Amino acid sequence: MPRRDYEDDPDAPRANSLVPAASVVVVDEEGRVLLQRRTDNGRWALPGGTMEIGESLADCGVRETFEEAGITIEVTGIVGTYTNPGHVLAYDDGEVRQEFSVCLLGRPTGGELRVSDESHEVAWFTPAETDDLPMLPSIRKRLSDWRAGRGPVVR
């Protein structure tokens, strides 16, 4: 389901749904962060996605990280909550979601890096290596908040 992100864009469509989602800043023992290059926009992003009925937010983060990157994780904290009503995600089916994402902090416990239907590439990056990667402002904000040690933030 292709999507288009709008952030503080006066021409953005009006939101018609609100869906809880989790993203995860997964940090390995060397201080590197796990990112995936998304198939829908070609940009680097944190693993994450929408919650399913019957799962906790932490379970969502664990599931999405494994599905999208092949890595099993333990959730160790919260980077922040991101609910900017000016950030909407418009899907081809007419759904327009207002951002509602909790960014978790996690550490890898196993698995092997692999791509999925949602990613062209998955890789570990030092924080400095993420500076020049193409990514949406909403993802960069989460990484910046983690790097600055601001968490948990409420945005």
Image (spheres, grey):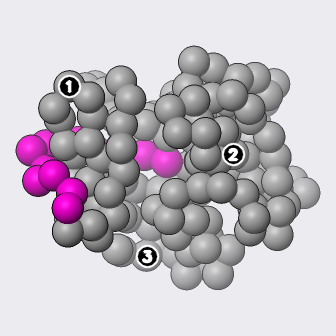
Q: Specify the quadrant of the image occupied by residue 90.
A: top left
Which residue is identified by label 1?
93
Q: Specify the quadrant of the image occupied by residue 146.
A: bottom right
Q: Among all residues in the image, which is located at the extreme right? A: 30
Which of labels 1 and 3 is toward the front? Answer: 1
In the rendered image, residue 81, in percent from the top left (x then y), is placed at: 37, 64
Which of labels 3 and 2 is toward the front? Answer: 2
Relative to 87, does residue 42 appear above or below in the rendering?
above
What type of secondary structure mainly makes up the magenta span? loop
Question: Considering the numbered disc 1 on the image, is that residue within a helix, a strand or a loop?
Answer: loop
What residue range appears in magenta? 11-23
Q: Residue at x 26, y 54 (%)?
A: 88
Q: How far apart are labels 1 and 2 at the CA level?
A: 27 Å
Q: Residue at x 16, y 32 (%)?
A: 94
Question: Reading the chain from its start, which is encountered first: label 3 or label 2?
Answer: 2
Q: How far apart are labels 1 and 3 at the CA level?
A: 32 Å
In the rendered image, residue 119, in percent from the top left (x then y), is placed at: 63, 29
Q: Amino acid at mark 1?
A: Asp
Relative to 67, does residue 154 appear above or below in the rendering?
below
Q: Residues within 10 Å of mark 3 (few under 14, many from 20)?
A: some
Relative to 73, does residue 124 appear above or below in the rendering?
below
Which residue is identified by label 2?
35
In the rendered image, residue 66, in percent from the top left (x then y), is placed at: 62, 27
Question: Considering the numbered disc 2 on the image, is that residue within a helix, a strand or a loop?
Answer: strand
